[in-house]
Amino acid sequence: MKTTAFTKYHLAAGAKMAEFAGYNMPIEFTGINDEHMTVRNGVGVFDVSHMGEIWVKGPKAEALLQHITTNDVSKLYDGKVQYSCMPNGRGGIVDDILVYRIDAETYLLVVNAANTEKDWAHICAEGAKMGLEAGPGKQLYNASDEICQLAVQGPLAMKVVQKMCDEPVEQMEYYTFRKMKVAGCDAILSITGYTGSGGCEIYVANEDADRLWKALWEAGAEYGLKNVGLGARDTLRLEKGFCLYGNDIDDTTSPIEAGLGWITKFVDGKDFIDRPLMERQKAEGVTRRLVGFKLIDRGIPRHGYKLTSPDGAEIGHVTSGTMSPCMKVGFGMGYVKPEFAKPGSEIAVEVRGRLLRAEVVKLPFV
């Protein structure tokens, strides 16, 4: 099992650790609800060093990305980040990713931890068709084992991070980044976030991890900075309706079904994988849609539970579900037949043989 450059600090803090995507990761420290509300109201830090980082460089970089991702890479400018996904050629999704444009011939892809090797193989295979080579000093390079990443999240996050930076960062725009010094380390500071509560991500080389960690906790002391584990990361993203790969999207779900049509751009000259299929889905409709729902009855929906019509006919399944720390009700996301996808529709969740009433709601939940 792999460790991150910060694992020793999690163990010293008494974190509940577990295997995730091949890494020994902190699941919780003081409890999921406490950590969740810390991020919603204050500031917390997540170790997300398990995420993958892949460089795509050279004169063919944009052309490759236009082919393997659904979003329009030509709209990016230096310092801009784009959310996108990679179709798999069978109507499903290889992964959902972030694309960072460093310059016209240099891009950084940030990919999900559990998919890093799969993504790398896919990118290399498609790159090879265009004459791109993979490896150190080549156009394609997997730097995942060399980079660590902290996500500092919450309404007070940028006040903490500002104390570690010589240039102003508190007013940086959403989905932008800068290459700059953070705590004296060469870093990429980006404003994306998976919690919906504001904040940033800081990428540095593994050898700078200790320096960054110590500086962050010194800067965060006056703001009540707390450690946050992957448990609260999941409840935070779910309240904002953000998809989790492996739950809400996977190799069998299309971005059109998943409500990701907004990152699927059918622009002239963009011949991306599965484009004809997705154009057809957009024009003709799909047989299921990803929706958010809240329970009316008391209970907790879980991944894999059946979703039914009010009279018990199966219409889909729960992809993500739990009890909301903010709303104090059971809630989740799942795929349903299109006729049940409209906000306000009443559905039911089958929990241990009982049908619990639920209502389809518009995302985000909070």
Image: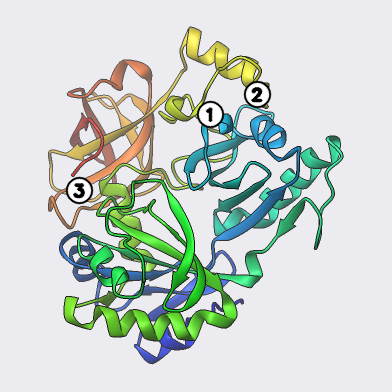
**Mark 1 surroundings within 10 Å by alpha-carbon count, few (fewer than 14), some (14 through 19), many (20 or more):** many
Q: Which residue is mark 1?
A: 254
State how far apart marks 3 and 1 are (Cα).
Answer: 26 Å
| Residue behind mark 2 | 274
Where is residue 263? Give x, y as percent.
47, 30
Residue 224 versus residue 312: which sits nearer the camera? 224
Q: Quadrant of the N terminus?
A: bottom right
Residue at screen point 87% across, 39% down:
131
Mark 2 closeness class: few <14, some 14–19, many ≥20 residues within 10 Å: many
347 relative to 49, above or below: above
Image quarter of residue 271: top right
Q: Earlier in the sequence, mark 3 or mark 2?
A: 2
For mark 1, give the secondary structure.
loop
Using residue 278 as the reference point, say whether residue 338 is left or right of it: left
Dots 1, 2 in contact, CB < 8 A: yes
Q: What is the secondary structure assignment of the residue under circle 3?
A: strand
Image quadrant where one finds the C terminus: top left
| Residue found 36% across the figure and 53% down from its top | 194
> Residues under labels 1 and 2: Cα distance?
10 Å
What label sits on residue 330 in the rendered view?
Answer: 3
In this rendering, the label closer to the viewer, 3 or 2: 2
Mark 2 or mark 1, which is nearer the start of the sequence?
1
Residue 278 location, quadrant:
top right
Which comes before the other along the chain, label 3 or label 1?
1
